[in-house]
Structures are given as C-alpha cells and as structure tokens.
Amino acid sequence: MIDQIDFNKLEITLSNTKKKAAGLSIIRLFLFFGIMAVGIVGLSEIRLLLILLPVLVGLFVYFIIEFNKQKDKEAYLKELIKMNEERLLRKERKLSSFNPGTEFQEKSHPFANDLDLFGEHSLYQLINHTVNKGGREKLVAKMKSSFNPKKAQMESKSIEELAKKDTFLQSFEALGRAFIKKEKSKEAFYDWIGTDLTWKSWLFIPMILGPLGGLAMLIGTVYFGMPFGWIGLWILLGGVFLATVFKPLQEAAMLMPNQGDIKTFAFWSSLLVKEQFKNTHLKELQQAFKNEDIEAPKILKSLEQKTFMIQNRLNLMYLIFNLLFWTDLFLWWRLILWKDKNGKYLSQWEKSFEEWQVLVSLSSFSNEENLSCKVNWLDREEIRVENLCHPLLHPQIAIGNDFKMKDSNHIVLLTGANMSGKTTFMRTLGINMVLANLGLSPFAKSFEMGSFQLFTSMRNSDNLGESVSSFYAELARIKLLLDTAESGVRVFFLLDEILKGTNTKDRIMGSEALIHQLYSAGGKGIISTHDIELSELETKLNYLVNKSFHSEITDQEIHFDYTIKDGPCPSFNAHKLMELMGIRFNEN
C-alpha cells in the first residue's frame, strides 16, 4: 500500500483510489446477485449450475479483500493530506485545533506548568505526533523528565537520522491515525495470554470431520436426493462439539484488541522491517521486529485475521458456514497455537511502538522546523546561547537574544519595564532547555549548557478550594526550590517577580535574603523583579550580575526592542501605561 504512493500527488492518488474502490464495490454487488441467482436456479432447476458457486464465492471474497485494501489506502491517504494541512498550521503557529494536552498539566512539577509545555498554544501541540494513549503518555513523560545529558545526546543522534526520513515519518504517523480509532486497553488480553489454555486432542476428530462431513451433506442433498433432514441432524451433532469452544471463544472475542490497533501494529512492523538505519539506538529498537527468528509482520497479520474472524463470529455468513463445517473448532485451535507461540511478544512490541511514536514525534518536529543547532553539554556550571528564540512564537516575529552565565556568575537579576520581555525571555530559555533535554535542537544559533535540573516559579496562583493564596503558593514553591538545591541537586532556577504578593519593604528584604540563601545552597539562575533597589547588590555580591530589558517612551506610545542588555533597567513605564489606559494623575 505504502510503496505505491507518490507523496507529491496525494490528491490525485486519493481520487483514483476512490474510483477503484467504487468499481470494486459494483463488481462485488454484481457477484452477490450472481451467487444468489445461481443458487436459486441451481437448486430449483439446473443442478449443474451449482458447480459455479465455489468459483463465484471465491471471486466474491477476492473482491471484498481488494475493496478493503482500497478503503485502507483511502483512509491512509486522507490522513497524509490532513497531516500536510496541519504542518502548515504548525508553521504559522496556529495551534488551536490541536489537542492541548491539558490533562498533563501539573502544578507541582519543577518546570512544566510555567513553560507552556501543555495547554492552549503549547509545546505539546507543536511537538505531538503520537496516535494513541500509550504514545502520548510516553511523550509527556519525556517532556517532564529530569535533565539527563547522556540520554539527551543519545536521543539527539537518533532524531538527527530519523528527521531526514520524511517518507518514513509521514507513513508511520498516517498509518496510526488511519486505523487506531477507539482505544481499548490490552491488559486483560495480556492476562489472558498468560493463562494456561489447552487444546483437547480428541477435538481433532470433529475439527477434521466437520468440513468433510458438511461438504458430503451438501453434495448428497443437492445431487443425490438425500433428505434435508440429514443436514438438520448434522447441525445438531455439530452443536454438541461447537458448545465446547463457544464460551472460550466468546471470552477471547471480548478481550482481544481492536482490529484497528492490530492492523496498525502489522503495518508499523512491516514499515520498520524494510527501513535501513545507521544509528545504533535505532537498530536496537528495530531488532525487536527484524529478528531472523521472529517475523513480526506475519505474526501480527495473523493476529489481525484471527481478531477479525473471532469478533465477527455472529455474522450471518459465518454462522451458516460454522453450523455446516464446524469452523469454530479450527479457529480455536489456531488461536491457541498463536497464543502459545507468539503471544509473549505482543506486549513487548506495544511498548516498543510507543517508543517509536515518541521518536517519530520528535523527529517530525525537527524535520518540520528544520532545526540544526547542536547542543554542547558542558561539564561546568555555565550557559551560553546565541540568537535564542521562543519556539511558540512565529519565526518572523520572534526576536533572538544572546545570553551567557559564567561559572562564577550564580545569579542574574533581571529588571525591566512592564511588557518589555523579561518573563518571555525566561520562558524562552527554559523551554529551549527542555528541547535540549529531549534530544532536540534548540531554537538558537548556538546553545551550550551545563548539567542542571531546571526549576521555575512563575505562575503561582491562588486556590480557593485549598484556601491557598498566591503569595503562600509562591512561598511553598520557593521552599521546594531551596530544599531541592540544599539536597545537593545542581539547580538552574527561573523566578519571575519574586514575592510580588507582599509590600515593597518586605519584598526587597525577603528577596535579598533569598538571593543569599540560593547562592549558599549552590543554586544558579535568573530572578526577575521590578524592585530596582535590588540591582545595587551587584556592587556587594561578586556572584550576582544585572541584566535588563528596556522601553522607549514617546508622547502616546511605548516602544520595546525585546533585547536583553547588561546592567539594570534605567527607567520603568508603569506610570505611562496607566496614563494610556485612561488613568489621570493629579499633577499637584
């Protein structure tokens, strides 16, 4: 299905596929009426016509299979076209139509809640290409994970290779989107696989006798005048044997995964087996499906067929065949064989597919954004970035900033006018650090950082349900930061407008005390504040440096350049902003 598609002509291919499916549907309809006509005429007048029935039925089944293949191809093509549309939306940073992942927000997390990782207009919307619950949860876990430079470097090499395989990335995602619809937990099925089910050897007799006897009954009745009552007796006899497997087959039908899940797994394994990788990590992940002793695509295709048969046993056509030929016995025997031989692999493969979904998501993101900045992980407590931009801002309006913190510089005090870019800059640095930890290229010309654990305190809100004020919430957040730093963890913190919930005098005293304590605990990071008085600490503390964002005020406008500068902010704009909003100040 995938090999026959020209990715540059998706609309044309989709149109042709729809026409072919429509043609196959018409042929199938004519064959159905042909089968009915031959059956009626053959039974009532010309018995020799019944010889055509097996041929017509065979053709009918063949065209059903071909029709289903075209419908699968149609679903796949539709997803590819939709993905191209979504790619353009992501490029324009129009993310409202994407799943925001709000359920993954976590206030207590060290940094996730402050950096727009989840929610409306979030990194999750920009980066997520997973197609099921397991894949999503795996991606979220990686986005929230503690910083691990060694693992990030390994992941970056895998992503770098995968990002160049555009056809593979699109095919993998589109296949999952096309066939995984209603998610169903497979845990009960895995438990069922672990149970001890035995095939009773005496059932081989009715299993073999069923098709032979059923065929003999039909031939005898049609061609040799055998009374129809014998078929009734045959069906009653079969009911005795079929009853032995009816209940276990029903239980299996309830527990088996959705057919769409298994169809996707079969397609994915086939795609992975054919692909050539150079990266060691990718080869290791591929090995689960490219093992010489285990043919994953065939095993999964076999399960897909069994799932379809077992879950459609109450279909009228199947019921007729089952009563005549006792096919449930053969189906149960084949299912037990599959379970005993291959059942143990499915759980492992599902976990591997979740890992592949994450890699495909990260690589697709890298491919779409054409990222190329390599992260240089330092063994020193330093950060140096050049032309750093926020990934959630449109590239045409995002303004890059250069920034560095030497080993001896532990705290940057960031001052600046309202709306000048202080908070956005801190979020820009934090979210790019998360990208680096994921193995992705940051949105920068160059990016160097030491091995830190990120901690932020920016969005501390009150909670009426817990009777918690925003000031108390911030204090609790700061205590958690101090405890983390004092435990020996190398923390890089981003604190926005600290202690803003109290009066100016207490805020300045508390902020100064906190700066001393953070340094003593070994912390490193940025603190933004409107209290310009704190900038005087630079002359007293050799580990603190002032940085700022400025604004230019004219008669009726305030202009921002959103560029970080050395030194404290020389002027603030709150007075002018209030004037522009209509607040009149008494000149006297």
Image (spheres, grey):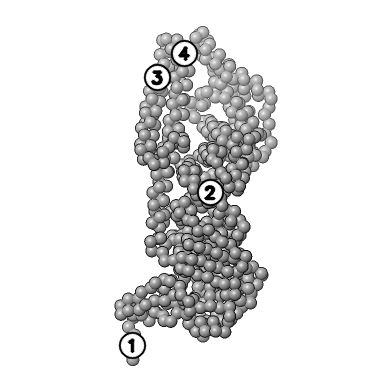
Q: CA distance from mark 4 to mark 2?
A: 58 Å
Residue 34, which numbered label?
3
Quarter of the picture containing the C terminus is bottom left
Q: Report whether 532 appears left or right of 437.
A: left
The local crowd at label 1, few if under 14, some if 14 to 19, many if 20 or more residues have their Cα within 10 Å, is few
Where is residue 80 drawn, in percent x and y?
42, 43
Residue on which the image places disc 1:
586
The local crowd at label 3, few if under 14, some if 14 to 19, many if 20 or more residues have their Cα within 10 Å, is some
Viewer-proximal residue among 445 and 294: 445
In the image, what residue occupies the spot 39% across and 31% down? 21
Q: Which of the two labelled residues, at mark 2 and mark 1, occupies the earlier sequence position?
A: 2
Q: Do labels 1 and 3 touch, CB within 8 Å?
A: no
Q: Which of the two labelled residues, at mark 3 and mark 2, occupies the earlier sequence position?
A: 3
Amino acid type of disc 2? Glu
* Residue 179 visible to an observer of this rendering: yes
Q: CA distance from mark 2 to mark 1?
A: 65 Å
Closer to us: mark 2 or mark 1?
A: 2
Residue on which the image places disc 4:
51
Extreme-top residue of the structure: 224
Which element carries disc 3, helix, strand or loop? helix
Q: Which of the two labelled residues, at mark 4 and mark 3, occupies the earlier sequence position?
A: 3
Q: CA distance from mark 3 to mark 2?
A: 54 Å
Which element carries disc 1, helix, strand or loop? loop
Where is residue 30 drawn, in percent x and y?
38, 23
Q: Which of the two labelled residues, at mark 4 and mark 1, occupies the earlier sequence position?
A: 4
* Residue 508 visible to an observer of this rendering: no
Amino acid type of disc 3? Gly
Closer to us: mark 3 or mark 2?
A: 2
Viewer-proximal residue among 488 and 396: 396
In the image, what residue occupies the spot 48% across and 81% down? 531
Residue on which the image places disc 2:
161
